[in-house]
Image (cartoon, rainbow, N blue to C red):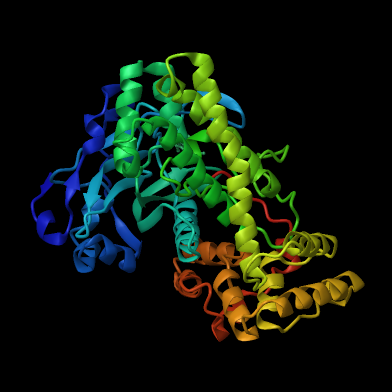
């Protein structure tokens, strides 16, 4: 059924991806849903996309569950490959349908993808479905990331389908509408490199440059610059994760977007106590994707990306490898530059002094030793009101504070300016795992969305330092430690 009212309601679909080589996708309509019920709609995002909120809540709901296909859309499932926990495998959208690319009134292009809308040729043994809890979890965390200023895919809506889905028990089925600059992954390039020819690879690469790295399109060295651009954006992204204590949990190459946005909110979580070895995911037994490993893993994934575009970098393989290595080896220093810059801001430091690095590292070491909460330590240093946490009574911390103060006194900026810089860079609230669980369980078990709404409200302004946020800054009760996450299915 074509929704003929859609043009009036703001949808403005194109489907440029469907013009790429056929290998890259399979035309696939979402599976219709019998009893759709909107449980959450992102009004701010609807407006940014130029969509009518009232329409989305009524007839527009049909688009959000795939019962109605807007004009200009061309639903498809994307093929991709990926290294999962280091092993190469063939993947693809097993439970997601890209319905098309929506062009906003400002002319920006966003993929509109329905996650949980039925089986595709890439589903393998899966049912192609998604359940309510994990979709709400993706909604909360992706929106929190966005508000923290971290590039990410976003969530437009979660709709229950009325279906009962069998997981470890029967759970309510749901569909998440995911909005992304694109869903082109490192794994998309790995797929075309393995299963396509060089012409296919060139078409995908030129398409991606046009879509995300337009500044390089006319350059003779566009493929090298593209690779460097991807490295740069990833380095910047991972630095942002590290600075807020975000652990992605499943940094497989299929979960890394070429646009530089964060994707796949499965087993991710924010670190409470500062511990570089933090791992939340139940299946990450060897800590491959631990907090401290994220930069290294990103560089490893980027090396897999570089390998996939090697034939475009130079005709001679050896020369191509040299070019690729040059780009990849930049990762570490770009990452470190962003991380250091961010850490200076977290401590209210303007300018650059030779002792900055030592001051930052010393604090992190003390935090680790005294099992200090990552977010709250920076929060308390920002407001200048230290809690009763052990760390603050330690001689190490007292010595460190002296060094920090000395450094602050060196700069011309006032205390107030320093404090403001810290406020802008240390969130006063993050999606604490126990708060997220509490909100999800009320929603899923009791159909009560008050806690979820309350959480989304405080997370919508994470640098506000408001009174309401104080409650949400509280540490988890002992019963919630350790926190374990599961791959959201
Ligand atoms: P993820 O862990 O979310 O990155 O998923 C890995 C792969 O499994 C992706 O290709 C997904 O599309 C696929 N997948 C996850 N859950 C399902 C499901 N319920 N049915 C079919 N495919 C799935
Ligand atoms: Mg994934």
> Residue lying furthest right in this view?
395
Question: Is any part of residue 23 visible from this angle?
Answer: yes
Give the quadrant of residue 184: top left
Q: Position of residue 426 (x, y in %)?
A: 60, 70
> Is 274 located above or below residue 326 in the figure?
below
| Quadrant containing the N terminus in the rendered view | top left
Of 52 and 67, nearer the camera is 52
Q: Position of residue 180 (x, y in %)?
A: 36, 49
> Is 149 located above or below residue 63 in the figure?
below
Give the quadrant of residue 343: bottom right
Of 377 and 225, nearer the camera is 225
Question: Is any part of residue 124 visible from this angle?
Answer: no
Seen at 52% across and 51% down, the residue is 237
Q: Answer left or right for 200 relative to 409.
A: left
Seen at 57% across and 79% down, the residue is 420
Q: Position of residue 412 (x, y in %)?
A: 64, 80
Seen at 44% across and 58% down, the residue is 139
> Residue lying furthest left in this view?
4
Of 81 and 137, nearer the camera is 81
Q: Answer left or right for 272 relative to 252.
A: right
Q: Answer left or right for 299 relative to 229.
A: right
Give the quadrant of residue 422: bottom right
> Is 352 located above or below residue 292 in the figure?
below
Marks counted in the figure total 0
Seen at 21% across and 55% down, the residue is 107
> Is 459 located above or below residue 120 in the figure?
below
Q: Position of residue 479 (x, y in %)?
A: 73, 64
């Amino acid at each position: 059924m074509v929704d003929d009212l859609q043009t009036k309601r703001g949808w403005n679909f194109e489907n440029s991806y469907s013009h790429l080589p056929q290998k890259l996708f399979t035309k696939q309509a979402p599976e219709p849903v019998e009893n759709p019920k909107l449980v959450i709609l992102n009004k701010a995002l609807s407006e940014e996309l130029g969509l009518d909120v009232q329409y989305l809540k009524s007839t527009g709901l049909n688009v959000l569950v795939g019962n109605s296909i807007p004009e200009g859309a061309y639903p498809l499932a994307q093929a991709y490959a990926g290294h999962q926990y280091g092993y190469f495998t063939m993947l693809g959208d097993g439970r997601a349908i890209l319905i098309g690319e929506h062009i906003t009134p400002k002319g920006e292009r966003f993929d509109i993808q329905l996650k949980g809308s039925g089986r595709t040729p890439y589903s393998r043994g899966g049912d192609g479905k998604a359940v309510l809890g994990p979709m709400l979890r993706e909604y909360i965390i992706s929106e929190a990331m966005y508000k923290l200023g971290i590039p990410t895919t976003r969530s437009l809506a979660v709709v229950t389908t009325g279906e009962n889905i069998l997981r470890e028990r029967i759970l309510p089925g749901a569909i998440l509408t995911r909005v992304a600059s694109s869903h082109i992954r490192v794994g998309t390039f790995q797929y075309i490199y393995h299963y396509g020819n060089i012409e296919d690879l060139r078409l995908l690469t030129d398409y991606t440059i046009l879509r995300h790295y337009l500044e390089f399109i006319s350059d003779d060295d566009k493929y090298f610059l593209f690779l460097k651009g991807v490295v740069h954006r990833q380095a910047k992204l991972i630095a942002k994760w590290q600075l807020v204590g975000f652990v992605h949990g499943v940094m497989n190459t299929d979960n890394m977007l070429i646009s530089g946005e964060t994707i796949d909110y499965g087993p991710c979580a924010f670190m409470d106590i500062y511990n570089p070895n933090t791992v939340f995911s139940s299946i990450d037994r060897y800590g491959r994707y631990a907090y401290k490993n994220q930069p290294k893993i990103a560089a490893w994934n980027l090396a897999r990306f570089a390998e996939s575009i090697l034939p475009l970098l130079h005709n001679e393989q050896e020369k191509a490898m040299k070019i690729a290595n040059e780009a990849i080896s930049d990762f570490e220093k770009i990452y470190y530059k962003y991380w250091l810059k961010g850490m200076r801001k977290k401590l209210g430091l303007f300018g650059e002094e030779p002792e900055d690095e030592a001051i930052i590292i010393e604090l992190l070491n003390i935090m680790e030793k005294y099992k200090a909460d990552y977010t709250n330590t920076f929060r308390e240093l920002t407001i200048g009101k230290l809690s009763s946490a052990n760390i603050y009574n330690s001689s190490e911390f007292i010595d460190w504070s002296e060094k920090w103060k000395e450094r602050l006194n060196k700069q011309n900026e006032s205390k107030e300016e320093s404090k403001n810089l810290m406020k802008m860079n240390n969130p006063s609230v993050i999606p604490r795992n126990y708060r997220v669980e509490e909100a999800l369980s009320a929603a899923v078990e009791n159909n009560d969305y008050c806690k979820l709404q309350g959480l989304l409200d405080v997370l919508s302004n994470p640098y506000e330092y408001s009174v309401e946020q104080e409650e949400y800054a509280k540490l988890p009760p002992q019963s919630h430690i350790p926190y374990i996450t599961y791959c959201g299915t």
